[in-house]
Amino acid sequence: GAGVSQSPSNKVTEKGKDVELRCDPISGHTALYWYRQSLGQGLEFLIYFQGNSAPDKSGLPSDRFSAERTGGSVSTLTIQRTQQEDSAVYLCASTTRQETQYFGPGTRLLVL
Amino acid sequence: GDSVTQMEGPVTLSEEAFLTINCTYTATGYPSLFWYVQYPGEGLQLLLKATKADDKGSNKGFEATYRKETTSFHLEKGSVQVSDSAVYFCALRHTDKLIFGTGTRLQVFP
């Protein structure tokens, strides 16, 4: 069965450009999470979608970051006017109402 | 706020050595506790979990016991293999978010 997929797997961009990262969760999973894994800083929660509820955006580091989840399935994380400190691996996870979160392989973002 | 602290790596061991990776947490109430593993080039995978005090999670020879009195969830394995080389993350879940430690890299040499 298909797991969580993310695209692109790698993204190199120039400072100031916008980027979009995509996550396809496991079919039927109602909850979707975005995390950021920065070098030496572990995993940092960014945003959480649960069903039709308003997303929990408490982890977004600035207003340059936003995310959408269309039709309760695919999600896109957008970073506007990228900065070098945005370079990281962006991880997506999905789950049912049970506790185990299943992670995608991540998108490695490098901002030059 | 809630937080997880785990020992810094890298941890370097010879094959068949005993492994301990320390993890302590700070949280209100009674969170669920997890160990995730990230093998080279792969995504995060759940290794084991425990949902209440004194529970022991186990998988693939790894074990961790939820110790409320010491707020700890140390990961142990009696005999590591080269294939165990990976980054290990301790995490807690309180409400709906996972809060992770910074990860500990384990390197096992033959």
Image (cartoon, rainbow, N blue to C red):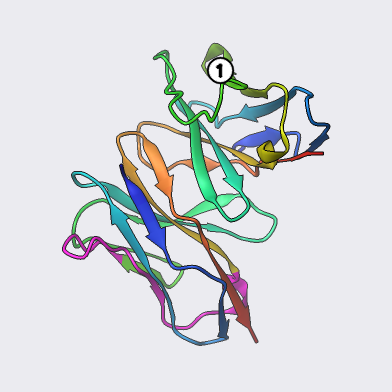
Vertical comparison of B76 with A80: above or below: below
Q: Is residue B66 magenta?
A: yes
| Amino acid of disc 1 | Arg
Residue A11 located left or right of residue B101 = right
Chain letter, disc 1 residue: A
Q: Residue drawn 57% across and 20% down? A: A63
Q: Is residue B27 magenta?
A: no
Q: Which image quadrant is residue A19 in?
A: top right
Depth order, front residue of A111/A93 = A111
Q: Residue drawn 51% across and 80% down? A: B80
- Report the magenta stretch's main SS: loop
Residue B90: x %, y % from top left:
42, 57
Vertical comparison of A98 with A68: above or below: below
Residue B69 located left or right of residue A52 = left
Q: Residue drawn 55% across and 12% down? A: A71
Vertical comparison of A37 with A57: above or below: below
**Residue tagged by mark 1?**
A69
Residue B4: x %, y % from top left:
37, 54
Kindly tell me whether residue A74 is visible in this rendering. Answer: no
